[in-house]
Amino acid sequence: MIFLLEPLKKVVVEDLGYSGEVVEEKRFGGFCDCGGKMFQRIWVKLENTKIMISECEKCWKNSAYFFNFTKFLRKEDVQVVDKNAIVEFFKNYLSDLEIEALIAKARNRAYKPSDFSRAKKKLDEMNFSVEEVLSVLK
């Protein structure tokens, strides 16, 4: 499953977060299964593959289109994670104590440094900086 963490503008593929180039203007991004037009949201580059995330103007579904630079490879559904669901998303990777430490740090409250340190290490392994995650948790 591919995730688009909307507040961070990051795409998560195989448990690793990738930053991409956000598409500001309305560019055609394919056709949806519902028949609507899709518009590009973000492009991400992974080694020899580029991924285009597009959103349907009709049903709001998001899809990932994989390209080998010039050749289309495949299409996958994307699960969008908004700001309200970001904590739930990270609960799949961090313990409750680590989540609590991140939230406490983001809100300038007391936290256990060892829990925060473990959370920071796990986030680093996923290609997330702790600062960007803290900015969303405030």
Image: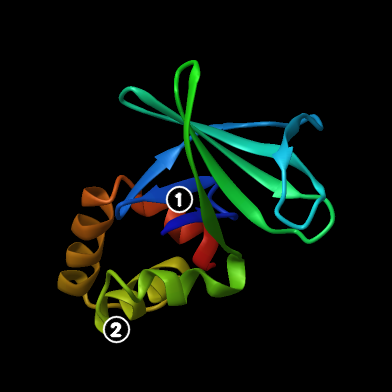
Q: Nearer the viewer, residue 95 or 81?
A: 81
Packing grade of label 2 (10 A; few <14, some 14-19, many >=20) is few
Q: Is residue 95 above or below residue 79?
A: below
**In the rendered image, which quarter is residue 68 located in?**
top left
In the picture, measured across the screen, residue 8 lies left or right of residue 93, that is right
> What kind of residue is marked 2?
Asp
Q: Residue at x 29, y 83 (%)?
A: 96
Which residue is denoted by mark 2 in the rendering?
96
Q: Residue at x 51, y 57 (%)?
A: 135
Q: Residue at x 28, y 69 (%)?
A: 93
Residue 130, image x and y in percent? 35, 53
Per the image, label 1 sits on a secondary structure element best described as helix
Which residue is denoted by mark 1 in the rendering?
132
**In the rendered image, which quarter is residue 102 located in?**
bottom left
Per the image, label 2 sits on a secondary structure element best described as helix
In the picture, measured across the screen, residue 40 lies left or right of residue 43, that is right
In the picture, measured across the screen, residue 51 lies left or right of residue 119, that is right
Instruction: Answer with mark 1 or mark 2, whichever residue precedes in sequence.
Output: 2
What colour scheme governs how the chains and residues are painted in the rendered image of this protein? rainbow
Q: Residue at x 49, y 46 (%)?
A: 10
Please state, as top left, top right, bottom left or bottom right, where the C terminus lies in the image: bottom right
Residue 76, image x and y in percent? 50, 50
> What kind of residue is marked 1?
Glu
